[in-house]
Amino acid sequence: LKAEDTFLVSLCAVLRDPVSLENCCKDGRERGQDNQDCTGLPLISASTTCRIVQEQCCASAIEDAGCTKGINMAKDLGACESLFSGSTCETKTSKMCCDCCLLGKAAQTLGQPCDLSLSVSYQCGLVSRACCVDGAPEQEFNGTQEANCVHKCESSGTCSCFKGYKLKPDGKSCEDINECLLGGHDCQPGERCINTVGSFRCQREVSCGTGYELTDSNVCKDIDECELGTHNCHTGFECINTRGSFRCKPKTQCGDGYIQDAQGNCIDINECLSMTGPCQPGQICINTVGSFNCQRNSVNCGRGYHLSEDGTRCVDIDECKGPDGACAGHGCINLVGSFRCECRSGYIFNSLTRVCEDINECRHYPGRLCAHKCDNVLGSYKCSCTMGFKLASDGRNCDDVNECESSPCSQECANVYGSYQCYCRRGYQLSDVDGTTCEDIDECALPTGGHICSYRCHNTPGSFHCTCPASGYTLAPNGRSCQDVDECVTGTHTCSETQSCFNIQGGFKCLSFECPDNYRRSGETTQRAQVSALLHFIIFLLELVSHSSSQLGSSNIVFDILEGNIQSSFDIVKRYEHDMIVGVVRQVKRLIGPQDIVLKLAMNYVTNGVVSHRNIVNVHIFVSEFWF
């Protein structure tokens, strides 16, 4: 397909759109007359062609308004330079139309033809001719007044338009043909078609850059800022155009010892600062207007400076030189007459002492850095934990230490949060000295130790055991008490057949019951039972029962201990019980065993103060060495 065919296909597609191209253009022109941005108009149709028509008609309206403004300026004021100083497209269009209108008015004034033979743009030619014709007096032309037609009046009396225009329905006025919209342009690939009044131009899509403008022939042409008056040279400067730019040349040339500033003024040069060694060694430079003087002077250098080798000037001291510099290992930046320290992390610069001082993070952030204890160190801090804890992997928190893993206790260990507790097995107690060692409890030495074992207590590590005398006793099932062994029952005694075995605590006795002369044995069984009732260290009673008091008549009973009362350890008393006279033998002193005692007791029958007869009882008392 040809380009014309492609355009016709698009046009046909547009014609099927419910919004006509005329309405699209009308909307664009109205928005352009309101000075809206033509590249961002609200679309009145989804058609791409309608959008293009809107944008181009909007741009055309803006250009027409700008051109009309320029023409009116030229007609009313007759000058353009001081009215258009901007660089926008609208300003350039207004200035172009103003300038071209001035050309037409000048041609009319000089009596030259209104059709210029100069190589100006097509639009400029049209504007020039219109302003030239508009200012000319009415003339006869083939019997028809040319002024009736805006552009050209034909011999037939009809109006026609210049190239790039079309006749409006009124038959007199002409309106621009949008070649870019209708596809009547010949722009090459990489160029953009821009409609102009009565024509169009092809503009490169890539701009020419600052200081250049794109001509109608699509060539980048240097902008003469000096000619256009778009330079910024001040009154004391002359504008000189350069390719792509311009420069301002001072109109007044400064003499020696001066330099020209941006406003063209001559300013004194301080040779003492701008020149290297303007004076001889030992002299000081004093600047003057347009020159300088050298004078001898003694130099006194202030803090941060020292005298140069030639003794003529003060030289900055580089405090940062040396292995550590003035900042003691921190970053040091030398300044003119001074220095500045860049402290490492954990330090802060003291502007008074001019040294880097350690930041005490523990004091500045109490309780926020470490869980337990915070210890400040130079440039940082360290966290530590109280006893029973260890530092966690994050270096800040504390974890409980299981001290029991290191076996600090001699026996049993129980870990608790932040500590541990030692405890001992039965029979041991925790030492009061170190709190970790288990010491044996001497149960035998306790205040109650005498009651643990009935005979003898033997302490063992963690426990104890009881023992009984070597003979005559056996340990009871409870392991503490001693039980008497009844040798008479077990048959382990050594009594003869003529003797009677009498068991005592811890042993036995072989007894022979023989009465003395003039006596006879009586109540053997009763007497033996009564004797066996005697106990060591316990008050015992031996009752000698006499007859009832009713049987005695006028007789009186008197009890007496005749023999064996060692250290008066016993006594005998008479009691009356149920009309019976009873003699009671009592132990009144402690007896130490082992020993055998024979108490010879007498029960005397006294009548009229005379012992009529008596009963003698021999009581054998066996005091054991041990008693349980």
Image: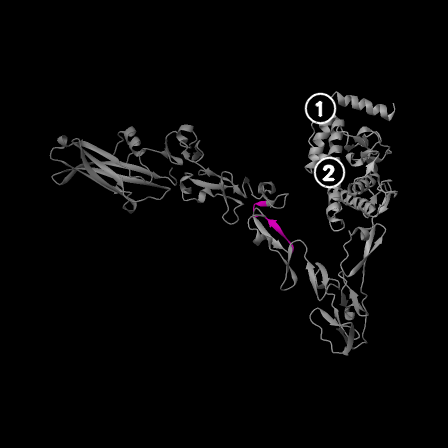
Snapshot quadrant of residue 275: bottom right
Residue under label 1: 19
> What is the magenta range?
378-389
> With 449 as the anchor, is 366 left or right in this view?
right
**Was residue 214 drawn as part of the magenta stretch in this picture?**
no
Residue under label 2: 62
**Nearer to me, 620 or 318:** 318
Task: Determine which of the numbered discs, if any, sits on residue 58 in the image.
Answer: none
**Residue type at numbered disc 1:** Val
The answer to whether residue 271 of the structure is visible from this angle is yes
Residue at left 82%, top 37%? 140
**Nearer to me, 332 or 105:** 105
Q: Position of residue 59 (x, y in %)?
A: 75, 36
The secondary element bearing badge 2 is classed as helix
> With 424 as the anchor, is 447 left or right in this view?
left
Snapshot quadrant of residue 268: bottom right
Snapshot quadrant of residue 121: top right
Instruction: Classify 373 as above or below 144.
Output: below
**Residue type at numbered disc 2:** Ile
1 or 2: tag closer to the N-terminus: 1
